[in-house]
Image (cartoon, grey):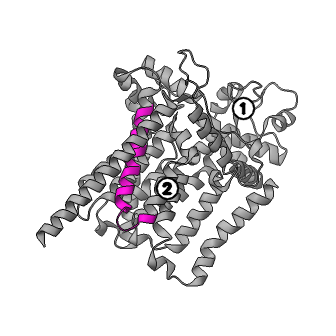
Amino acid sequence: MSGLSTRWRTRDQRSIALAFTVVLLVAVAHGLLFWPGILTWDAIRQYGQALSGRYDDWHPPGMSWLWRQFRVFGSGPAPMLVLQLALYWSGTALWLRATRRDHRRAALVIAVLALSPVMLVLIGTVLKDSLFAGALLLASGLIAAARPGERWGRSIAAIVLVAAATLRFNAVPACLPLLVLTAPAAWRRSLPRLAMTSVLAAIPLALALPLANAALHAERSGVELSLVIYDLGGIGRFSGAAMFPAVEVDDPVAVNAQCYTPVSWDRYAWWGADPCAIGFTTLRTPLRAGHGPYAWWAKAVLAHPLAYAEHRLAHFNSNSRFLVHDADLPGLSLASDPNPWGFTLAPNAARDAVATAAQALLRTPFGWPICWLALGVGLLVLRPAVRTLDPAAAMAWSAVLYGFSYLPLSVASEVRYHLWTIAAIGIAAALTLPRADIRALPRWRWVLAGVPLVVVVLGVVVARL
């Protein structure tokens, strides 16, 4: 009997080694396809700060600092591309290991999701969103692959999650369910314990970004004004009232109406080809006068709550690609933007094919974040018991909370913001839907879970006809 057990363990170890070898080869091929990494405007600004060692808080300075340390491995986007690939594919490998024996169908779905062209393009682009998604995929994979009673994997996952919280201002809702899962099961055995554990876990996550900014002496850039200005512009557009501090324009209401779009705040920024006469440059000083920008924001919201709601819903409609036309929204970045260092991607027919497939997928439910969010809500209807939080449920909560955090907080409409939402809900669905106890649920529960997805899919299809 012991000999049989030994043979099974040997076979198991060989299959694990083979799987990890395959994933490694895929990761190398992925890297070669996008080498040295797509460098967008955001990353160009971050790399410039990495070279100078002087940071501001417009983009996460922690990422720029890390990029500076990675210069020993080479210049340009390549070191950060390697890091993103390492996080993404090691996380994928851990999930495949966690599901290969008991959930082989789930493992196949996870592999297909990881290889989807949209994912390949976004991970091949040096972005805080791609780094964030890769970090969360690694952390969740460590949690899923950990054996009962094994603490080291969960401890590393907790460290990765806190580090990931330095990458996005709205990272807390994404990281919190996963960080709670790293705590001992006894800490979430009852609702009061779960609530207390959640509060304790939220503290380091909420402090991670401001502490990183302070430690790196990041200069205040006024990044918080982007949301305030966009909301004031939206409220002004839907209320027909002047919401901004007085500026030297003849008709501020008419000017704002021409500048506002539910797609993004870019017309109010300084970097566009046709910046608005009322925008960041003209408003930065007057908004900070008196009680500050948040006083202006609160006053406007309280005076015109319906206009604020219209603006936020209109923008989330674009951000989540709901009742819109895909041609009106930004696509994927498929090449590096012009940069002072001349970093670019060499022509590559295989990459062009992947890019073409990715752009095509953006015109399907796979590329519409609202469809993923509707699926995530349905999964939570099927698994409502938060006290029995497991990796699948934690992934669904993480994705849904993070995705809907863009309803009040977003200023732009790009698929990259929903990279983690798509990955996490895809994994949660792969783990949840085949389960026998889920399939045995009463029919009304399945109907209730399916209604959001059916309504959303019908809506997005009709809107695009």
Quadrant location, the N terminus: bottom left
| Residue 293 visible, this angle | no
**Three-letter amino acid code at the position of disc 2:** Ala
Magenta region includes residue 418: no
Quadrant housing residue 68: top left
Quadrant housing residue 65: top left
Look at the numbered disc 2 and give the secondary structure of its residue: helix
Look at the numbered disc 1 and give the secondary structure of its residue: helix
Tell me residue 5's x, y (percent): 17, 68
Residue 265, above or below 204: above
**Mark toward the start of the polypeptide (2 vs 1):** 1
The overriding secondary structure of the stretch rendered in magenta is helix
Boundaries of the magenta span: 81-105
Q: Determine the residue located farthest toward the left in the rendered image.
A: 2
In this image, 154 relative to 457: left or right?
left
In this image, 84 relative to 370: left or right?
left
| Residue at mark 1 | 268
Badge 2 density bin: few <14, some 14–19, many ≥20, Cα 10 Å: many
Q: Residue at x 65, y 66 (%)?
A: 453
| Residue at mark 2 | 424
In this image, 426 relative to 265: left or right?
left
Quadrant location, the C terminus: bottom right
Picture disc at residue 215: none
Q: Residue at x 55, y 22 (%)?
A: 344
